Image (cartoon, rainbow, N blue to C red):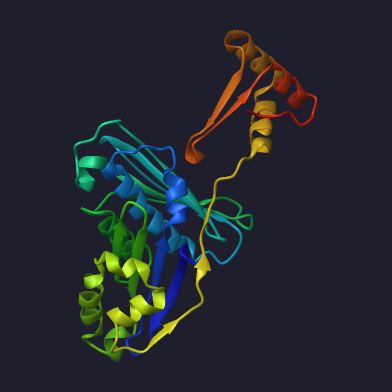
Amino acid sequence: MSNYVQRFLLENLDIRGAVVHLDSVWQDMLSGRNYPLPVTQLLGEMSAVTLLLGENLKQTGRLTIQLTGNGPVSMLVLDCTESLHLRGMAKCEAAIDAQSVFDLLGNGQLVLTLDMPSMRESYQSIVPLDGGTIAGIFEHYFKQSEQLPSRLFLIAADNTIFGLLLQKLPNADLTDPDGWARTEALAATIYDHKLFDLTAAEILTRLFHEETIRIFDPHPVHYGCKEDPAKIYAMLRSLGRKEADSILKEFGEIIVNDDICNREYRLDALAVDAIFREAGPTVH
């Protein structure tokens, strides 16, 4: 598999982690977007973090992560299901000269939302953007939410995304007082694109060759966007026939944009009539 998340444990150090690798899923997400390069890199790093967090979902649900700010990139939003179906988008200016995360996003906030059928209402966590990189922002979030020292190493290239998460478990210092610092230093050598062609097991063995590594089964990642006309039909029914007819009269058709999946639905008068007659119209 080339799109996966795979957890591991450094058994003798009491340090856990996970590796994420994307290629075709990442390319599908970017198809037709034409984002400036700095925005593409932000979205790629966010994709890796979203999957590293989403892989922990233990039951049916959806994790949504949103960064908003007052910079030229006003919003980054990604979500994934418990089965790691990922989708995402950015809202940004057409031309961007800024490079740093602060210059791109400006002042803003991180919003993490968890929706599960078993929950009476969504869980939401909102924190200020604190960190000079995407990795730094989420390391701060981990510290606040999980109270575990965590390190993220993220690489977003043209065709590939790679991420490595490390977390220091409570007994790590008792197991090896220097283990965490040593592991951080070794992980920091990850920024070598030659590693993209290796499996997670090969990468971890090269990084931590002196450690005992337990590697768990990989979880495949899928692109989470598929055509969903039923959602559009339901939205129009909730809008009401009178309002739909008013839009048709003014514009000749109804156009619905699904921004997160970069898809446009166009419905003419016949299609709208079929929706309200509970038939199955053709969307083009």
Residue appearing at x 67%, y 28% in the figure: 238
Horizontal and vertical percent for residue 243? 64, 16
Horizontal and vertical percent for residue 29? 45, 46
Where, by quadrant of the figure, is residue 215 drawn? Answer: bottom left
Q: Decide which of 37, 135 is in the foreground and name it.
A: 37
How many discs appear? 0
Would residue 53 be seen by someone viewing this image from the given angle? yes
Depicted 141 relative to depicted 19: above or below: above
Would residue 63 be seen by someone viewing this image from the given angle? no
Horizontal and vertical percent for residue 209? 29, 86
- Horizontal arrangement in the rendering, residue 50 relative to residue 280 (left or right): left
Residue appearing at x 28%, y 68% in the figure: 194
Horizontal and vertical percent for residue 188? 22, 71
- Horizontal arrangement in the rendering, residue 204 relative to residue 251 (left or right): left
Residue appearing at x 48%, y 79% in the figure: 216
Depicted 89 relative to depicted 202: above or below: above
Residue appearing at x 35%, y 62% in the figure: 162
- Horizontal arrangement in the rendering, residue 182 relative to residue 196 (left or right): left
Q: Decide which of 224, 244 is in the foreground and name it.
A: 224
